[in-house]
Structure formats: structure tokens, C-alpha cells
Amino acid sequence: MVKYIFGPVPSRRLGISLGVDLVPFKTCTFNCIYCQLGRTTNQTLKRKEYIKAQEVLKELKEKLANWRAPRQMSGSGKLIKQKINYITLSGSGEPTLNSKISKIISGTKKMTSIPVAVLTNGSLLYRKEVRDSLKKADLVIPSLDGGSTKIFKKINRPVESLGIERIVKGLMAFRKEYWGKIWLEVMLVKGVNDKKEAIEKLKRAIAKIKPDRVQLNTVARPPCEKFAKALSKGELEKIKNLLGPPTEVIIDFERRALPEKMKDLKKGIMTMLKRRPATVKDLVDGLGVHRNEVLKYLAFLEKEKKIKSLSYKGKRYYQAE
Ligand code: SF4
């Protein structure tokens, strides 16, 4: 069974993305209030080979060799092959905690011409060896949700010793040393980091970092804390104008058609949920796919109002509407 590779899944930013998991669930330096994976169970700054580079690369090689691109109807009515746009290192926590991330990036680049993207919370970029380890990636998407200690602690709930100044300095150093693209993601949570004063502080930090793009996002999937609420499209647009270029609001991918193969998984989830309510784990075990893949389709189905989620004895269940 595939353990570390998930997808391809449609991504709002990256098109069709093949995910690679570099840490076990859920290993992170943060414990963000909006995290869709749930609360962090292993909060650490310790870098190690949590998942063996060799195993990840072996699995990736097999996945790419067996990938049969599904065909999809283009706008002009032609059948086109749906290709993978990015191989994305992310997964069940913070990928830079894997001390062999550099080896995984180089190994992937040797295997395929598909660009490699890294989704990171940016918390370890103050370390030179971490910045160096990402140099061969084509795209790095770090996150930064606030420019002040107060907001940083409130929203990201980091390992005690991590400070926002150090993280911003790390991002600035990375910008100077890295030749690829940097798209900075800002996750906005209603009433937490969306006030004018907070946005002004964030704007000052962004001006120092100089990313190629700033992408505003908000809570779209069930967050780990119920009080983490989404902003409306209008509120996001206002913040975009306050921050100015190169800021954009990430458009929902759901409006695009899903390739056939992906529709099958969506159908599989619906079939299970019509039978009885299920947790994410039930769906992962039942369908034999990665947790992140399941989360993605649950979000689509919730948006389409085909399913709803409810809490029972501290667990989140999904059921068909
Ligand atoms: S950094 Fe990412 S994985 Fe870690 S807690 Fe925050 S949202 Fe979750």
C-alpha cells in the first residue's frame, strides 16, 4: 500500500499536485488553531529522518511509473491528458523537520522533470542548513500569519522557544539565498489576525521578506479549533487591497471540473458516508488512501452541501446530507 505519496489531488494553487509526506502524523513545530489535520501530537524542533528518504523515493518512482494520466475534456471539446503540475512536499506536519529533505528533493529532480514545491511553515528557515536543504526546489510556499509575537503565539501556538523575529529573519535570509519562486501564504482567521493593526504589522514583515507572491487564504476545511472561523470573500479582498501587490486571494479550485479518476474517489467517499457516518480515519482505512486526499474531497463535498460534519464523544464524524 502507498504510504508516503498521496494524490494526485487538485490544489487551489498548484493545479494537479502529487503529495509527498515527509513526517509521521502529526509532527510539527506549530499547533495552528486552523490546522485541518487536528492538534499536533508531536510538537518538536528536532530534525531527523522521520521517514527514510530511500523509501520515499522508491515509492515515488513506482507511483510515477504507474501513473496513467486520465483524460479530460478541454474547453474546445478535445480530450487532453491531465498531467501532474507539481510534486509537493508537505503532508502530515512540517516537512523541513525531515533532515533528509534535501536528498528527497535532489532524488525527485533526478527522477522527473515535474517541478518540486515545498509547503512549509517557515519556522526552521533561521537555520542555514534548512535554507540550504531547500535550494533545489522550484517553488517554496512558506506561511506567515502575523507580524507580531502576540498574533503569532495566538494563531500558530509554536514550540515555546520560537519567536516571530527569528522566523522573519530566516525568511529574509532565504529570499536572499534562494533563486526559485517564493509564494508567501497568509492564513486569515476571523477576529484573530484580520484587524487593521495586525495587517499593517504583517505588511511591514512582508516588505522585508520580498516574496514573489503573497497568497491570502482562510479556513476552508474543518479546523482543529472550532473558534477558528473563515473570512468572507469581501473581507479577504479588503485585506488584499490593504497589503497591495503582489497579494492575491486564492481562488477556489472546486469550480474547475475534476478529472475522472478523482471523481471516483469522491464517489467512494459518498458511498461510505451514505451507509453510515464515518471519521477521517474510517475513510482512510476503508478506501486505502492517504489522509490528506480524504480531507481534500471532504472539503469539496461539504462545500457542495452533500455531506455535513458533527462532533460525537470528542470525534468528528462526516455523514451524507
Ligand atoms: S504548520 Fe501546518 S501542519 Fe503545522 S500545525 Fe500549522 S497548519 Fe498544521
Image (spheres, rainbow, N blue to C red):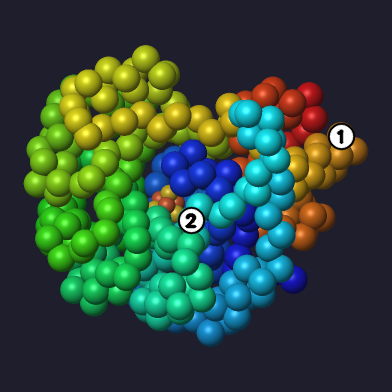
Q: Is residue 89 left or right of residue 284?
A: left
The residue at 26%/23% (across/down) is 239
Q: Earlier in the sequence, mark 2 or mark 1?
A: 2
Residue 234: % across, % down: 37, 15
Q: Can residue 227 be spotted in the picture?
A: no
Quarter of the C terminus within the rendering: top right
Q: Residue at x 53, y 84 (%)?
A: 54
- For residue 86, the mark is 2
Q: Position of residue 304 (x, y in %)?
A: 67, 24
- Quadrant of the image containing the N terminus: bottom right
Q: Amino acid at mark 2?
A: Tyr
Classify residue 56 as left or right of residue 277.
left
| Amino acid identity at mark 1 | Lys
Q: CA distance from mark 2 to mark 1?
A: 33 Å
- What residue is shown at x 20% (from left), y 71% (from top)? 127
Asked if one can make out residue 19 in the rendered structure from this viewpoint, the answer is yes
Determine which quarter of the picture holds residue 170. Answer: bottom left
Q: Secondary structure at mark 1?
A: helix
Image side of residue 258 versus residue 182, left or right: right
| In the rendered image, the vertical position of residue 28 relative to residue 219, given as above or below | below
Marker disc for residue 33:
none
Label 2's element? Answer: strand
Query: Which residue is labeled 1 in the image?
Result: 274
Relative to 26, does residue 276 appear above or below in the rendering?
A: above
Question: How many neighbours does mark 2 have within 10 angstroms: few (below 14), some (14-19), or many (20 or more)?
Answer: many
Ligand 1 within 8 Å, label 2 CB: no
Q: Residue furthest right?
A: 275
